[in-house]
Structures are given as C-alpha cells and as structure tokens.
C-alpha cells in the first residue's frame, strides 16, 4: 500500500550541522553544542536492536499469548456495526478511526482488544522506535530519512501492527515523549525518550472512556491526528517524529459528551446497545464463561475462523487499491452530505473510503449502492449539527436522506 522509495529521494543531502553557544550559569564559560537540525539520536537498547529471527518472533508471540490471552474476535456475538467499523479501519487505516459509544457492559473494550489477533504484519526498520516504513519516506523518522539519503542499507523486519492503550491519567510527557535536556547540553545530542504516540505510529491508539480524557491530552491528539506528526519542544530544542495511527475511542454517552473538534477526527461512529433478546444474552454469558474457564482451549476452538478472517483482511488490504467507485455514486454521496448540512468535506472522503473498503472485504472490485448504504450512517452520524428538539436518531436521518437521493 505504501509507495516505493523514489530514486529522487536518495539525492537528498544530509542536514548540515550548526553550532549553538550557551553560557554555563555556574562558571560563566561558554559551551559549544553541535546540533544537526531535526536529527534524532536514540540511545539505549532501541539503537542496538538487531533483527529478530523467525524463531525468536515465534517464541515472543507464544509468551505474549500465554501471559494475556484475548477473547477471539470471531467468537463475539452481535455488535455487528461495531465489528464492521473496526474491520474497515484495519483494511484502510486512512478512514480515520472509530468512535464507539454505548451502554456500559456491552463489550466495547473486549471487541477492540480482540482485534489484536487479526492485525496484519507490516515492514518496519529494525531498531527504529517509530515503526518507520522502509518504503515510504512520509512514514519515516528523521533519523531513518537521513540514513536513507546517505545510501545506508536499512535492516527490515516484519512485525504485527501494534495496539497501544492510552490511559486516562497519562501525563503529556508519557504520551508525547521527553527530551533529556542535560544530555543535550553536556553531550550536544538530542536524546529523546519516545512516548505512546511514537509506539502507536502505523498502529492503533485505543482510548477507553475517551470522553473523560483531559483537555491537554485531547489537544495533543488533535495536533497529531491533523498533521500525522508529533512535535516535542523543550528549552529551545525541537524533535518531530511521524505519528500516524488509527484512533479508536470508546465511551458511555451518559458520562459526558466528546469535544466536537475531537469527535470530527474520528472517521466512523458506531453506536452500541444492550442486547435485549434473552436467548442471545444466554449465549453471550456462556461464551464468556467458557473463555474464563479455559482461555487457551476456547481460543483453539475458534482458531480456524480466526485464520479465515485474517486471510480475508489480508486479501482485502492487497486488493483495496484496485476497487473502483462510479462517478455518479460519488456525486450522490456528496449530495447526501450537502443536503444534511455536513460541515467540511471529511464526511465525503470517509464515506468513499469506507465503501471501497467494504467492497474489498466482500471480495469485489466495484462499489455498489448497497455498500454505501451500509457505511454512510457510521460516516455521517456524528457530523450532523445537534438539534435538541429532534427526537429521531441521527443515523436514521442519514438513512432517510440516502434513500431519498439514491432512489
């Protein structure tokens, strides 16, 4: 999916060093510090990491599974809307993430965390803490860019897409990363300790109870989601790194609304309700009891279904670029957005992307009106202007307008 490294990029020269003079406060002597602009030096084990063999990867995977087994995605009963939105974002990360709102105890966190087993592998540069893509300059850290520009060989490894949990009580330094000022002044290098945004690059960032997130962290997420980069500024030293992630949030609407600026950054919105059918509730309880009693055995019974779904996702990701959507369908999507008074063009873009991802998931190379009808409520529901006197659900408003335009 990522473009190959262009030949013109290799002609870029390495950034020229500059000398910054500072005065030591205690002795009055001048200290000369040599900086490379936007150049990142990462110390410690990350820089010394060597490429893992397949046997080591297998052992790592087995140990992680034995420590914390997750509920199988294919074993989840109901909640089809939420599951579909998550799968579409895995197929096309540029959709922009999912906001999941619903009653407590409806399995929102369970479904999101069960997605880990289905995440495909990506190519990363070994030893780079930002999961840089060796084939796409836009997804490279500045250090990897410099190495590529100098013609250095980049060691490559395949790894699973990572899912990072953002705790509500996390500090800004833990999320964005920190700069070691003392090391910068004494040794003249930008010693950077990566944060959660660095780890989530090219992966998934999950925020449970996102509507309770502190405002300063919301601002950080807005900046990163808008630009795809995270910039840390400390004492006149600036470091930037790529931070392109699938943002997944969940919350209970009774506990507070989400800020409109952040809500608009979610590509899709899924509403989750409590299951009312008694037989279905019994089945859910039995499935959960079976998993709690024997997690490994329960996961083994769903192994074949999990592998089938993994292959389906991998096939959809590889065929996504060839999926076409007719011009008249795109015009009708934009007409629905215009007549619903949706602000901006993000609703149009996300609706097109989600429809193409759904067609790829179904194994087709052309989008149909049915595909659009399936995804457009989730793409536009949270973008409608709030009317306190309106009693009808916003998703139903979207569906009504869809059939009015597409008929």
Image (cartoon, rainbow, N blue to C red):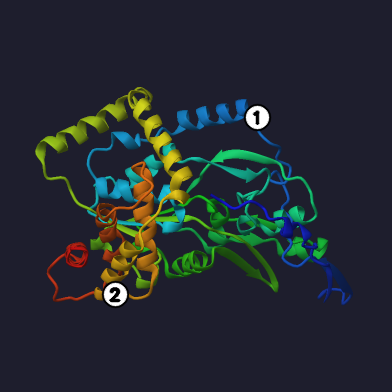
Residue at 34% over, 47% down:
109
Badge 2: residue crowd in 10 Å (few <14, some 14–19, many ≥20): some
Q: Where is residue 249 in the image (x, y as percent from the top left)?
A: 37, 56
| Image: 252 above or below 295 | below
Q: Which residue lies furthest to the left in this view?
A: 278
Residue at 48% over, 40% down:
120
CB atoms of marks 2 and 1 within 8 Å: no
Residue 174 found in image quarter: bottom right
Numbered badge on residue 53: 1
- The secondary structure type at the circle numbered 2 is helix
Residue at 56% over, 61% down:
176
* In front of the other: 285 or 315: 315
For marks 2 and 1, the one nearer the N-term is 1
* In front of the other: 3 or 93: 3
Residue 258 found in image quarter: bottom left
| Image: 376 above or below 151 | below
Foreground mark, 2 or 1, reads 2
Numbered badge on residue 338: 2
Q: Which residue lies furthest to the right in this view?
A: 29
Residue at 26% over, 64% down:
381
| Image: 54 above or below 327 | above
Numbered badge on residue 116: none
Q: Can residue 34 be seen in this view?
A: yes
Q: Where is residue 106 in the image (x, y as percent from the top left)?
A: 24, 47
* In front of the other: 323 or 255: 323
């Amino acid at each position: 999916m990522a473009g190959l490294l262009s030949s013109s990029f290799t002609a870029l020269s390495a950034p020229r060093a500059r000398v910054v003079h500072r005065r030591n406060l205690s002795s009055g002597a001048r200290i000369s510090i040599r900086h490379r602009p936007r150049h990142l030096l990462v110390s410690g084990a990350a820089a010394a990491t060597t490429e893992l063999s397949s046997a080591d990867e297998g052992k790592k995977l087995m140990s992680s599974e034995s420590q914390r087994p997750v509920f199988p995605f294919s074993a989840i009963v109901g909640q089809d809307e939420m599951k579909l939105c998550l799968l579409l974002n895995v197929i096309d990360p540029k959709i922009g993430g999912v906001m999941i709102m619903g009653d407590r105890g409806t399995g929102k966190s369970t479904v999101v965390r069960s997605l880990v087993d289905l995440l495909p592998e990506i190519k990363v540069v070994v030893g780079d803490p930002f999961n840089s893509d060796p084939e796409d300059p836009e997804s490279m850290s500045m250090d990897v860019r410099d190495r590529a520009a100098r013609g250095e060989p980049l060691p490559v490894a395949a790894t699973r897409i990572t899912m990072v949990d953002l705790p509500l009580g996390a500090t800004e330094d833990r999320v964005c990363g920190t700069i070691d000022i003392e090391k910068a002044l004494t040794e003249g290098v930008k010693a950077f300790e990566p944060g959660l945004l660095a780890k989530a690059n090219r992966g998934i960032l999950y925020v449970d109870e996102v509507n309770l997130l502190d405002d300063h962290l919301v601002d950080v997420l807005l900046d990163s989601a808008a630009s795809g980069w995270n910039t840390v500024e400390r004492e006149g030293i600036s470091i930037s790194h790529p931070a392109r992630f699938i943002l997944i949030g969940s919350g209970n609407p009774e506990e507070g609304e989400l800020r409109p600026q952040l809500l608009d950054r979610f590509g899709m919105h899924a509403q989750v309700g409590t299951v009312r059918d008694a037989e279905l509730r019994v089945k859910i309880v039995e499935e959960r009891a079976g998993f709690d009693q024997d997690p490994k055995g329960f996961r083994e019974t769903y192994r074949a279904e999990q592998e089938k779904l993994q292959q389906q996702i991998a096939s959809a990701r590889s065929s996504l670029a060839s999926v076409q959507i007719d011009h008249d369908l795109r015009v009708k999507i934009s007409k629905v957005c215009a007549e619903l008074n949706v602000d901006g063009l993000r609703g149009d873009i996300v609706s097109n992307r989600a429809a193409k991802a759904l067609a790829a998931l179904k194994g087709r190379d052309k989008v149909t009106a049915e595909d659009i009808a399936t995804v457009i409520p989730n793409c536009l529901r949270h973008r409608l202007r709030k009317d306190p006197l309106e009693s009808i659900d916003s998703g139903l408003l979207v569906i009504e307008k869809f059939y009015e335009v597409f008929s």
